[in-house]
Amino acid sequence: MQIGICDDQREARERIADEIMKMYPEAKLRFYESGDELLNTHQMPDILFLDIQMPGTGGMETAVEIRKKNRQMILIFVTALEDYVFQAFDVGAFHYLVKPFTEEKFAAVLKRALEQCQELQKPEALSGNSSPGFMVTAKGAHITVHMEEIVYAEVFNRKIILHTLDSDIEYYGKMKELEKMAGEDFYRPHRAYLVNFNYIKKYDASVIDLERGQALMAKQNYHDFVKSYLRYNRKKGNW
C-alpha cells in the first residue's frame, strides 16, 4: 500500500508524513511538489493527500485528471480553504481536511482510509463483480448485470436501457423493480430515470451529468435528491 502526499510546501509534506508514520510506520510514502509532478508519475499511490492551492495545475484540476484514469484511489484533500468542499464531491473525495487540523482528526481520517483501501484491494472488489448480479434477456441473449456497473437506467419505448461505462443493455422490465433491487446507492430523480450516485459528475435542479450521459431531474425531487446524495457521500466517507 502506497500513500502519496502532494503539496508545494515542504513543511506541510513533512507534517503529514510524520502523522502517517506515527500510525503506520511501515508505510511506503511518495512525495510530490506539484500536481504536474503527480500526474506525470507512472504509478499512482493507493491513498493521496492533496493540497488545493498549488502553483501550476491546482489540486482540484489534478483530482479531475486523476479520476479520468483511476476511480479507486482514496483521495483526501488537505487545505486551508473551505470553499471547495462541494467540488470535492464531484471528484469522489474520501475526505476534506481543513487546516489546521488536530492529530486526533487526522488519525481518524487515516484509519478509515486504510480500512477502505484494504476493502478495495480484496479479490472480490478487484474483480469488479463484488455485488450479486441479476439476469436480463437482451436481443435473445441472457446477460448478467451487476449493479455497480450501471451508470444510470432510463425508460424508453416500454423498455429499460441500462447504461454502463462501456455499453447499453435494453430489456423489457419495470423501473420500480429495478429501483427496488438497486438500493440506497441509486436515486430516481425522474420517473424515467434511475441514477447511480457513484457516477455523478455534477447536477442542478433540471439535469444530472454522469460519467456517461445525462438524466433529467424533476423539480419536485431536487431537494430530496440533494439530501440523499449527501447521505451517500457521508456513508462512503466522502465528506
Image (cartoon, rainbow, N blue to C red):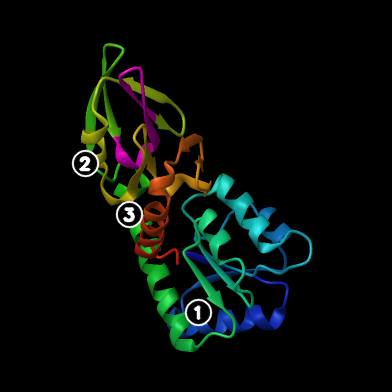
In this rendering, is residue 174 above or below 189? above
Q: CA distance from mark 2 to mark 3?
A: 27 Å
- Disc 2 marks which amino acid? Lys
Q: CA distance from mark 2 to mark 1?
A: 41 Å
Residue 20: assigned label: 1
Q: Residues within 10 Å of mark 1 (few under 14, many from 20)?
A: some
* Residue at image location 51% in from the left, 58% down from the top: 89
Residue 20 image point, x, y percent: 50, 79
Percent across and percent down for residue 161 are 36, 25
- In this image, 40 relative to 25: left or right? right
Kind of residue sitting beneath label 3: Lys
Circle 3 is placed at which residue position?
Answer: 122
Image quadrant in which you'd find residue 151: top left
**Closest to the observer, 59 or 183:** 183
Q: Residue at x 72, y 65 (%)?
A: 34
Magenta stretch, residue numbers: 146-162
Can you see residue 233? yes
Residue sticking out furthest to the top: 140
Q: Secondary structure at mark 3?
A: loop
- Is 172 positioned to the left or the right of 148 in the image? left
**What residue do we see at 34% from left, 63% from top?**
235
Closer to the eye: label 2 or 1: 2
Q: Which residue is mark 2?
A: 180
Question: What amino acid type is highlighted by mark number 1?
Answer: Ile
